[in-house]
């Protein structure tokens, strides 16, 4: 998830660099569907990372951006594999 997704799910709205490299618990949210009563969503886990297109736009720091994205994806795989 990127910055926009993190803003929607993480209540204290920390910056994306603070969220990276750690799986965060999202507290359940109230989902309002049109013409339906609100529904409590179960807790979820999220991992914030940069969008892959950000790697392509990072001209001078492309390798560092790529390495960061790969590290985040490896963390996700490891977390899901437990």
Image: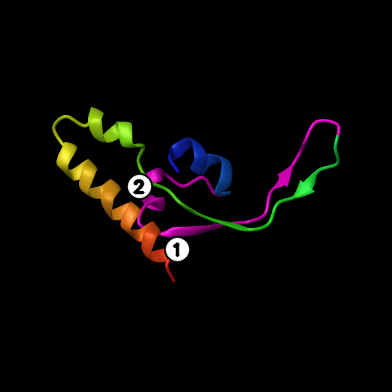
Q: How far from the left and from the top, in percent, is residue 30?
A: 73, 46
| Front position in the image: 78 or 19 | 78
The structure residue drawn at horizontal position 31% and vertical position 31%, both measured from the top left corner, is 53
Q: Left or right of 38: which side holds 81?
A: left
Question: Where 81 sits versus 14, above or below?
Answer: below
Residue, disc 2: 17
Left or right: where 19 falls relative to 32 = left
Residue found at x 81% / y 43%: 38
Q: Nearer the viewer, mark 2 or mark 1?
A: 1
**Mark linked to residue 80:** 1
Mark earlier in primary sequence (2, 1): 2
Query: Compared with residue 2, is residue 74 higher up or lower down, i.e. above or below?
Result: below
Q: Residue at left 25%, top 35%?
A: 55
The picture quadrant where one finds residue 28 is bottom right
Quarter of the picture containing the N terminus is top left
Q: How is the image coloured?
A: rainbow
Look at the numbered disc 1 and give the secondary structure of its residue. helix
Give the magenta range: 12-35
Q: Position of residue 66 (x, y in %)?
A: 22, 43
Residue 75: within the magenta? no
């Amino acid at each position: 998830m990127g910055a926009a997704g993190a803003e929607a799910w993480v209540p204290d709205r920390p910056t994306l660099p603070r969220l990276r490299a750690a799986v965060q618990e999202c507290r359940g949210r109230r989902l309002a569907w049109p013409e339906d009563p609100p529904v409590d969503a179960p807790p979820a886990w999220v991992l914030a990372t940069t969008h892959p297109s950000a790697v392509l736009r990072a001209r001078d720091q492309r390798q560092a951006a790529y390495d960061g994205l790969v590290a985040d994806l490896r963390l996700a795989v490891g977390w899901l594999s437990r």
